[in-house]
Image (tube, helix red, strand yellow):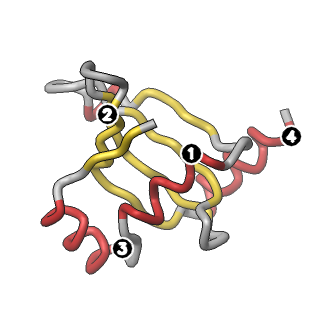
Amino acid sequence: MTFEWHEGKNSANSSKHGVWFEEAQTVWADPGSIEFHDPEHSAEEERFIRVGYSSASRILLVVFCEREQGGVIRIIGARKATPRERKQYEEGIRS
């Protein structure tokens, strides 16, 4: 699996949310992570959200799209999950 992102966006995301995209990509290694479509933000491209534990043991929400060429995942944004999102994640693991 290959990841990509815009470096300027990565820096801005870290300043705003305290999460670098390098950490965000580690959410894909969490076997309990949950993923769903984000229709509200998919007008120009299909966007998805993944929630899971990062390598830093934080539950993150990651917004991304999948590039058609070679299955590349482009990370658009990442932040710590809200309490509601954490609950959804935890309920997803139990089901």
Other residues around mark 2 within 10 Å, as few (<14) / some (14–19) / many (≥20):
some
Residue 76 versus residue 90: which sits nearer the camera? 76
Which of the two marks, 1 or 4, is nearer to us in this view? 1
| 7 lies left or right of 16 | left
- On residue 17, the disc is 3
| 20 lies left or right of 29 | left
Residue at coordinates 61% horizontally, 66% vertically from top-left? 55
Amino acid type shown at disc 2: Cys
Q: Position of residue 51 (x, y in %)?
A: 56, 48
Q: Earlier in the sequence, mark 3 or mark 2?
A: 3
Using the numbered discs, state the Cα–Cα distance from disc 3 to disc 2 in whole angstroms.
Answer: 19 Å
Residue holding disc 4: 94
Amino acid type shown at disc 3: His
Using the numbered discs, state the Cα–Cα distance from disc 4 to disc 2 in whole angstroms.
Answer: 27 Å
Which of the two marks, 4 or 2, is nearer to us in this view? 2
**SS of the residue under disc 3:** helix
- On residue 28, the disc is 1
Asked if 40 appears above or below 62 in the picture, the reply is above
Q: Earlier in the sequence, mark 1 or mark 4?
A: 1
Q: Position of residue 29 (x, y in %)?
A: 62, 48
**SS of the residue under disc 1:** helix
Q: Earlier in the sequence, mark 3 or mark 1?
A: 3
Residue holding disc 2: 65
Using the numbered discs, state the Cα–Cα distance from disc 1 to disc 2 in whole angstroms.
Answer: 13 Å
Other residues around mark 1 within 10 Å, as few (<14) / some (14–19) / many (≥20):
some
